[in-house]
Amino acid sequence: MAAKNSVAMPKEPLTGAGYTPGPPCVMCFGMIDDAVRDHLEAGVAIIVGTASPNGRPHASRGYGAVAIDDRHLRVFLDASDAAAIENARTTRRVAVTTGDNHTFQSLQCKGTVESVAEATPDDHAAALAHMERFWDRVTFEDNVSRDVLARFTPVAYVTCTMHVEAMFDQTPGPRAGGVLEAPSR
């Protein structure tokens, strides 16, 4: 029972944080604000999409995403996912989709890979901390054993640092697919 009370639930939907769907933006300066950081840090599910040079799509799980600044994310990938790593290095295009299993609030960041590197010990700790938060949420919402979830934890990670060029609201509903504009300052 104590674990259920320790789960951090989102404060408000991204649309309540000043975002409104609008026309596609060419460069999304200032896209990653506190609401996006809170969403990423809440233990969301992460899917990373890449494609090979011949256009073959590849989807893989992300094991955490950290906002470096208002235009860059560092995403943790399984070091044994050769296709995702090779695609990120060669085509340099990536889509990172995150989803909150409690509210279904989802967002997608599309952009260009700036680097793929071996994870540092701090990166490993951040990825494991993210997975702990994710497991807390899944065990709370879906009553899935942590032992089952732990089987999906990679032994090693790589980091994929991306420049976010566009961000989309992917929350189910009439606004799904809408471009998230940078909040006005």
Image: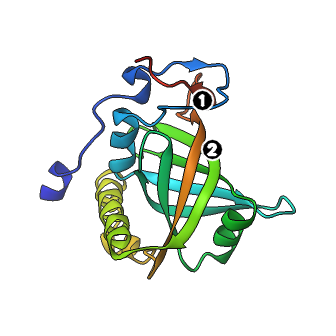
Residue 29 image offset from top left, x and y in percent? 52, 32
Check the image and report above or below for 143 versus 108. below
- Quadrant of image for the C terminus: top left
What amino acid is at disc 1?
A: Ala
Residue 142 image offset from top left, x and y in percent? 37, 55
- How busy is the neighbourhood of tag 2: few (under 14 within 10 Å), some, or many (20 plus)? some
Label 1 or label 2, whichever lies nearer to me, is 2
What amino acid is at disc 2?
A: Lys
Secondary element type, mark 2: strand
- Quadrant of image for the N terminus: bottom left
Comes first in the chain, label 1 or label 2: 2
Check the image and report above or below for 51 versus 125. above
- How busy is the neighbourhood of tag 1: few (under 14 within 10 Å), some, or many (20 plus)? some
Residue 89 image offset from top left, x and y in percent? 68, 66
Of residues 129 and 105, the one nearer the viewer is: 129
Check the image and report above or below for 118 versus 37. below
Residue 133 image offset from top left, x and y in percent? 30, 57
Of residues 152 and 39, the one nearer the viewer is: 39
Of residues 50 and 145, the one nearer the viewer is: 50
> Which residue in the protein does label 2 denote?
110
Real-space CA distance between mark 1 and mark 2, rounded to the nearest whole angstrom: 15 Å
Does any portion of residue 31 appear in the rendered image? yes
- Residue in view at x 53 percent, y 58 percent: 161
- Residue in view at x 33 percent, y 64 percent: 126
Secondary element type, mark 1: loop
> Which residue in the protein does label 1 denote?
176
Of residues 90 and 76, the one nearer the viewer is: 90
Callouts 1 and 2 close, C-beta under 8 Å? no
Question: How many labels sit on residues?
Answer: 2
